[in-house]
Structure formats: C-alpha cells, structure tokens
Image (tube, rainbow, N blue to C red):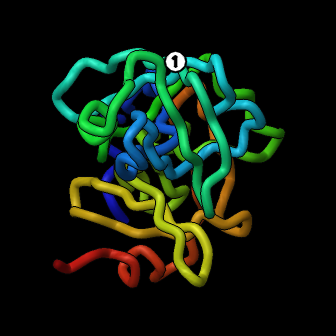
C-alpha cells in the first residue's frame, strides 16, 4: 500500500482549449486545411475568432473570413491572410478558444482538458499521480498518470470510478487489487 503523503497541488484548468490544428496551405489565396477536434456547431463559421498558437509563442487572434468542409476536415480563410506564403506560415499551429467559450459538459461527462491536471487517488493505494494525458485504445479510455512511482496507465471506466471533481481537480478511483502493478510502465 502506497503512503498517503500530503496531496501535491493539482494543475489549474487551462485558459484556452485546443479545437483544431492547421494542417497546410491550400491554393494560392491564403486558405488553409484544418483538422477539427470540436463538435460545437458554428465553431469554425465565418466571423468566429480563434487563437492561433505555437509552443513558446503568444497566441494570436484570427477571425475566420470563409469556411467550408473539405474531405474529413475544413478549408478556412482568415482575415489578413491573403496568399499562399502567409497561409503556409500557419501550418502546424494549434487553433484554440478561450475556456469560457466551451459549453458545459453534460452531467456525468467530461472534456479531456478538464481531466488533464487532476490528481488521481485510489481508495486503497492513495495518491496515484497527476493526469498528464488521455489515451484512447481498443479497450476504452485510459488515464496516463505521472506520479512518484513513474508513469501509470489506468482505465477510466465507470466500474472503477468513485468521483470526478473537476472544480477540485481530483479523481477518486477504486481499482481492483493488482491492477496498479499491472498498469505501471517499466520503460
């Protein structure tokens, strides 16, 4: 049984939420192809403002001038981006919105960004670590935790879930005996 040491501070909710990524320039008039990760109707509609963000840089606001479906993604043109070179410079950047623009999740449902940064606790083992990522695999959703014992992947399923307190940044689990040892990364 792990020790129940003082609870390290969980990470706060992010101020912005990633809703897509610019894949590449398209055509000669400043359009870009975008991979959308949002199911909010109108998120990428003409007139909407998005934040373009690259790691290590300050996000910059861009307003959508034109939008249409393109295959499994979108084709967007932003105000002030008028040619292929300007569009190509956006490739690889993430598109974000302010957290307040994200509609509340339904009861019993959670956005991935709400879970990342939460501290996870097991009723028997105590502190398991902080959620650093969520992984979807064939068996369901896994929480990737980073804790004192290293990395741990645990199933995020109702059978093991006691409580999720997004505001308190805490997830309480009741894992079966032996599962923690089976889920601990040795790499």
Residue that label 1 marks: 63
Q: Is residue 65 above or below residue 67?
A: above
> Which percent across, then down, holds residue 185?
27, 76
Give the secondary structure at mark 1. Answer: strand
Q: Residue at x 37, y 66 (%)?
A: 1
* Label 1 Cα crowd, 10 Å radius (few <14 / some 14-19 / many 20+): some
Find residue 48 and report its horizontal and vertical position in percent: 62, 20
User: In the depicted view, which residue is nearer to us: 83 or 71?
Assistant: 83
| Residue 49: quarter of image | top right
* Depth order, front residue of 171/4: 171
Q: Is residue 116 left or right of residue 152?
A: right
Identify which residue is drawn at 34% across, 17% down: 60
Image quadrant holding the C terminus, namely: bottom left
Q: Is residue 130 visible?
A: no
Viewer-closest of 47 and 21: 47
Residue at 63% over, 43% down: 38
């Amino acid at each position: 049984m792990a020790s129940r040491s003082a609870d390290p501070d969980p990470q706060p909710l992010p101020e912005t939420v990633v809703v897509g990524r610019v894949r590449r320039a398209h055509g000669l008039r400043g359009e870009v192809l975008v991979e959308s990760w949002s199911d909010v109707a109108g998120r990428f509609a003409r007139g909407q403002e998005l934040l373009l963000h690259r790691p290590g840089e300050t996000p910059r606001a861009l307003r959508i001038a034109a939008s249409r479906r393109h295959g499994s993604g979108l084709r967007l043109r932003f105000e002030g981006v008028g040619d292929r070179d300007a569009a190509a410079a956006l490739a690889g950047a993430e598109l974000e919105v302010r957290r307040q623009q994200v509609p509340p999740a339904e009861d019993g449902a959670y956005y991935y960004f709400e879970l990342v940064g939460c501290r996870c606790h097991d009723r028997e083992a105590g502190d398991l670590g902080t959620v650093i990522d969520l992984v979807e695999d064939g068996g369901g959703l896994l929480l990737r935790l980073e804790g004192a014992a290293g990395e741990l992947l645990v199933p995020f399923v109702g059978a093991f879930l006691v409580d999720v307190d997004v505001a308190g940044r805490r997830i309480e689990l009741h894992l079966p005996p032996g599962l923690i040892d089976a889920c601990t990364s040795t790499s």
